[in-house]
Amino acid sequence: MGDTADLETMLEDADFLEHCYRNVLVELGFTAEHAAVVASCVSDGDRNGKLTQGIGVFEIPVLLARTGTMDVTAEPKVVDEGPTWLVIDARRSSGQWAVSMAMEAAIAKAREHAIAIGFVRDFNDAGAFGTYVRMAAREGMMAIATNNSLPLVSPWGGMENVLSGAPFAAATPGGDHPPIVSDIQAIEVHDGDLSEAYFQGRRLAGPYLVDPESGELTDDPAPYFQRMEDYGRISDCLAPTVFGTPRLYAFNLFTEMLAGVINPGARLSPEIAGPPSYWLKPRHEALTGGACVVVIDPSHWMPVGEAGRRSDRLVESVKGARRRPGVDEIFLPGERGWHSMEVGAPVRILPAHWESFVQIVESVGLSIDGLRTDYSAGRR
């Protein structure tokens, strides 16, 4: 998708939304600890302007908990480890809990040994991966994180979804300026982008769909979109998606190398079932094949805080570059989200996601008005 600044959105209090997420998950059988972790991670997507990875992605843990595909009572466990690496088996728990655990453990190992790598397997969707690399940046460390998914994109030259809609995130610590956070997807459009375009009556940013009969490329999802009742993001599309460039194709395979190929016990993206509607029924396997996090503590070879000072110099050079006409300020990746979190600004959400969310709230016996009353009482 292209620039989302002009999309039709509504504003909501991020803390209130997180309160709602936590309460809905508890009603679905999550432990208080598990619900708090998932709610915090989903809220982080809202707070960082990820329109399809905040409230939009909340549908996924709800769906998987309802079907029993996610075991909401299971606790991820470290099943193997060495001084600089570990493997977590999530046992069909949430990706938010499992990847957070992997990042916390990798941070601890990197603090002692300079670098650490964590692998996660048998977990369900983990949402926005910028959430996890920011954990390391706050500790003065650099991190990268990725996972694979059900097949959501065709290989270069193909017209069948085989590869994942992988997220990829990286962050370095900041100093006086916020950390630099690159939080991207290794795919032109995923299911959330398609539903966003469909509900907004828009075309995609480029011809990233391939007609399954003719093989012709198109930017219009409407003829192929299959809306799922009661959901605002989860959807099927009859037209496979494609890469816009060979470079993104190569980058997508790089994420698979990390998340699947070198991850013991993980499934590769082509080995995960799809399309999204497959997961509307109970399944005995988790939605995601594998994840990888890497944490680097630069304080082992430079003074504490030096990486942040060097980052500040880079940020100031970038922001000080000559601007194009009409551009008031140059922003670094993740900068606006970081400032938004600091000031507690209201977050933007898509109306279709809000409508679906209200239905979810009501389906577990709660109400938006009741949750808002509880939230307001708790703030007094």
Image (cartoon, helix red, strand yellow):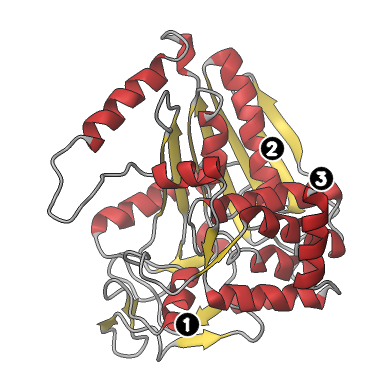
Q: Quadrant of residue 193?
A: bottom left
Q: Is residue 107 above or below residue 212?
A: above
- CA–CA distance between discs 1 and 3? 34 Å
Residue to which mark 3 is pinned: 33
Residue shown at 54% from the left, 30% from the top: 136
Please provide percent x and percent y for residue 287.
64, 62
Q: Total marks drawn?
A: 3
Q: Residue at x 82, y 51 (%)?
A: 378
Q: Earlier in the sequence, mark 2 or mark 3?
A: 3
* Marker disc for residue 295: none
Instruction: Work out whether mark 1 precedes mark 2 in sequence or the reverse, and give the earlier one.
Output: 2
Query: Residue 188 or 349: which is nearer the viewer?
Result: 349
Position in image of residue 351 (x %, y %) = 54, 76
Q: Secondary structure at mark 1?
A: helix
346 with respect to 368 (left or right): left
Viewer-side label of 2, 3: 3
Query: Residues at badges 1 and 3 in contact (C-beta under 8 Å)?
Result: no
> For this view, does 344 lie left or right of residue 188?
right
Q: Amino acid at mark 1?
A: Phe
The residue wearing badge 1 is 199
Q: Which residue is mark 2?
A: 101
Residue 135 placement (x, y as % from top left): 57, 34
